[in-house]
Structures are given as C-alpha cells and as structure tokens.
Image: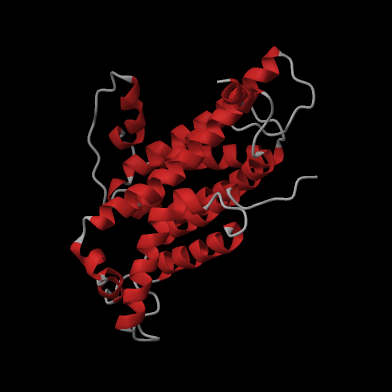
Amino acid sequence: MKKLVEYFFSGYNFISETGNFRKLLYLVVTVKIFYWLSFYNLFFGNNAFAYTQPLSLNFIKDYAYVLYSSQSKTTGYVFLYGALILLLLSYSIKKIPFVFEFILWFLVLNIHNKLYPTLTGGSYLINQFLFFNCFFSKRSQAKLDWKKSISVCFHNFGITATILQILMVYFIAALSKLNDIDWLHGDALYKLSKVGHYNMFSTWFNSNYLVDVLLNYVVLGYQLLFPVLVWIKKIKKMFLLIGVLMHLYIAFVMGLVEFGSVMIISYIIFWPIKKQ
C-alpha cells in the first residue's frame, strides 16, 4: 500500500514520455482535421455519406452526439476549427488549462461519432488517449505542496490508464485471434494481403505464403506476450522496433493507417530514456 501511495503522489512518472506522446498525438489529430476540411462536403455537407438524426440530449453521455444530431451543415466547421485553435494553443502555451484539453477531447469525440462509418480501432484509441491526456502535467514541479500533490496524482493516474489501455489492446487482440481459425492455422495475414483494395503495395510484389504464415504467428505471439516482454530492459528496444515494423505492415498492407500510426506513437511511453 505504501509503494502504491508513493507511486501516485511522490513525483511525476514518465514526464518526458508524456510530453513527446502528446505532441505526436496532437500531430495525428491535426492531420485528421485538415483531411476532414479538405473533403468537408463529403463528411459534413449536403452530400455527406454519414446520416444524422436529431436527438434529445438529456444525459451527460448524450453530449457526445451534439454534432451527430445537428441538422446544420456548417456546425462541422465550428468543431473542426475549434479543435484546431485548441491544438494551436496547446503547442504555443506551456501551461494550458485543463479545461482546454477536455474541450479538445469533447470536440474530437463528437467529430468521430458524426463520422461513425469511418471509425477504426485507431479512432477509438485517439478518443481514449485524448481523455487521459487531460490529466497529464505539462511540466514537473520540484517542490510539492498539497495542491501540487493532487496534480501529481492526476498525472500518474493518466499515464497509468494510458499504459493499461495499450496493454489491454494487445492482450485482448491476441485473445480474439486465438479464437479465430484463420489465425490459428496461420492463414490470416496471407488472406488479408490478398485484399488489394487495402494493400498499398499489392501491385509491387506478390506475398509469399510461407513468409505470411511465419509473420502470422510472430504477430500472434507478439501481441500475446507484449504486456510482459515490454518491461524487460535488455530486450525492450529491439522488442519495440519489431512492433514498429508490425504496425507499419498493419498501416500499409492491411490499410489501417490510423491504427498503425497511433500504436507506433504509443511506443514513446515505453521507449527507454536516459534520466538526466
């Protein structure tokens, strides 16, 4: 119990890692916003492919669907440009108020719910990471009073929740694969590589069945063992580099660019940094 209290209150954990993680996470969100603005009419305009439905917002959870329930074709601009302004403020102001981070999460959550047919695992992870990011501290304080101790606790809660989220993604993904006959037989990646619509390199080379079978089991083992092996210092860097290659494959061969990018960004939290 004493060690648990010390972990949450004695100092800021992963302070450098969270700063780098936030910057790259915001970069991904910024790219997504510019993409949505470039095809605004497709996503939010009169010819939008995602239908909306007026809702009566009575409970707190219903406010995640403010944009979804709006019938105005210009409301999307409010959410998109609002998010861009908050991102700019976060980059330019060292100590941005907690409420700004919370509003950014709220805006992106609404945008994702409006564009529900386009959501991937990466979209849901961005929602979670932006929420946990609200608790991250911008800088470490040398001297702590009781107010700063609360800030320390919130920061450590946020980083702990983020780490647990990443570990759960891998472990649950591995469990689902263990219940899939294609993954157990080693055929899953081979079949996925044959879907040319998502494979950006399908016209450049033909996949090899034996190689795909080998990669199939490597991916399965990596995801299943990630929650344990990622903490072993001697192999951590090599282990994470293997994960980077795996997620590049997921991004450009399986077509899940957003998910692959977000997972690579999450590795910043685990990457070993020499303490000054």
Q: Position of residue 219 (x, y in %)?
A: 38, 64
Q: Observer-nearest residue: 156 or 264?
A: 156
Q: Residue furthest top?
A: 146
Residue, x 35% and y 21% (percent of image)?
Answer: 60
Instruction: Name the spot of residue 190 as percent of width and height, x first.
Output: 28, 75
Residue at 33% of width from left, 25% of height from top? 61
Position of the N terminus, as image quadrant, is top right
- Residue furthest left in the image: 181
x and y, in percent, of residue 67 in the image: 35, 35
Q: How many marks?
A: 0
**Based on the displayed image, in which of its 4 quarters is residue 166 positioned?**
top left
Q: Is residue 106 left or right of residue 146?
A: left
Image coordinates for residue 36, horizontal then vertical, percent? 43, 52
Q: Viewed as shown, does residue 171 lie left or right of 154? A: left
Q: Nearer the viewer, residue 38 or 180?
A: 180
**Image quadrant of residue 275?**
top right
Chosen colour scheme: secondary structure
Quarter of the image where the C terminus is located: top right
Q: Residue at x 26, y 65 (%)?
A: 183
Residue ID at (66%, 30%): 96
Horizontal placement of 148 versus 120: left or right? right
**Residue 213 visible within the image:** yes
